[in-house]
Amino acid sequence: MGNGSVPDEPPKKKRGRPPGARKMASETTAKKVGQRHKGIPDTSARTVVKESVTSTQTLRDQTIQDADDNSATPFSSLLHTIMYRDRVELSRVARELAVAENTVYRWMNGTSEPRATHLKRLPEVLPEHRIPLIAAIQETFGDVLGNPAPTIKEISKEIYQRVLEQMAHSQDDETRFWHISEILFEDILERLDANHHGLAVTYAKLMPAHQDGIHSLREVKMRGHVPWPDTVDSKAYLGSTTLVGAAAVLQRIQTWNDMDNNRALVEIDEHERSACAVPVLRGGMLAGVLVVSSTQPDFFKDTTACQAAAEYALLIGVALCDREFYPSALLHLRPMPPLRWQREEINRKYLNRIIAYAHQHSTSRREAEFWIQQEMELEFEDEAHKLVEQK
């Protein structure tokens, strides 16, 4: 008509979003955010955590893969075995050595070598693996650790004074031995192993004689530094195949070390790489043997260490009464089973047998121990005989 419009033409659709679309989208977004705050996990946060875990696992897997390739050394392989899947221990070692954890990982897979200062500290940081670790370091890097001679000071006059004081004040034989041996064993460990490389000291006394003589010595006291325990309750019998037995029969100091390739000649403790056994004598009579064991293969090549052991053996003799000494003619030592087998057997049976004996015979524990020790000595002797026959 006058304005040019067509009355029957349908209205044109407007371009863009339909009315209310923006509002609906905003409400939907707000609803999703609200759901996340109500406890539904955020996928983006989950992705970050997953990536972090994957990264750590990838590093570990790469360490494993690298450790298995041809670049692995005796050192890296051992380090990998010690700390594989033990992140806590790896972190501790890194912290002790003041290096990054990734540095330790590189040592483990053989792509990096520790500095000499770190190599020298590792046996101290991992004392329970000290012996194989030193061997692996020497095999991989040569004589980087060096073998400094142990610095052993003379036994102080104070120790003699303390021993004499205990002699004067002790009320009975058992108390006297306990106090004096405590003083001496503590001083031995401190004087001969001040740096805690690994040392053990043991006193073994002669068992009572059978009709045909004395068959073995029995450990009565032991103290040690790692890798040995502080003390041992399962006290073994030491016979003719031990260094202690040789020292008793010959009545003179006996030493051996790993470097002389004579390990097979005597029964040894699993941690020993050198040892010194000194008989405890009085007027030609023998009471027992003091033995000092070290993780260092050349420890007793130093005559100062042997002299110190001999001096401590003299002081141990002061703590003993006359009836504990026997003529050497009574010695008829027999072979005994391996030390590990003995300790396991004693751990399983010793205490229960004492209790049973005391109950059955209505006797004291001390008397029960006396008889059970002799019974087990004969049983172990028979076991050793069977092992020899089997071989």
Image (cartoon, rainbow, N blue to C red):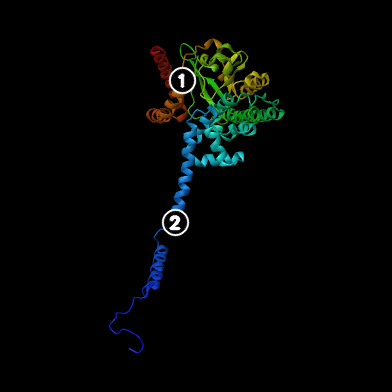
Secondary structure beneath disc 1? loop
Residue 182 image offset from top left, x and y in percent: 60, 31
The numbered disc on residue 338 is 1
Residue 164 image offset from top left, x and y in percent: 67, 28
Q: What residue sits 46% from the left and 24% below the top?
A: 340
| Screen quadrant of the C terminus | top left
Residue placed most toward the observer, 241 or 33: 33
Tell me, yes or no, if residue 257 can be seen here. Answer: no
Q: Which amino acid does label 1 sit on?
A: Pro
- When the figure is inspected, residue 61 is found, relative to residue 387, above or below; the finding is below
Farthest residue in the left direction? 8
Residue 149 image offset from top left, x and y in percent: 67, 23
Q: Which amino acid does label 2 sit on?
A: Ser
Is residue 336 found left or right of 96 in the rendered image?
A: left
Residue placed most toward the observer, 5 or 127: 5
Q: What residue sits 69% from the left and 29% below the top?
A: 161
Residue 195 image offset from top left, x and y in percent: 64, 31
Q: Earlier in the sequence, mark 1 or mark 2?
A: 2
Tell me, yes or no, if residue 298 can be seen here. Answer: yes
Secondary structure beneath disc 2? helix
| Screen quadrant of the N terminus | bottom left
The numbered disc on residue 258 is none
The numbered disc on residue 44 is 2
**Quarter of the rendering containing residue 326:** top right
Circle 1 or circle 2, nearest the eye: 2
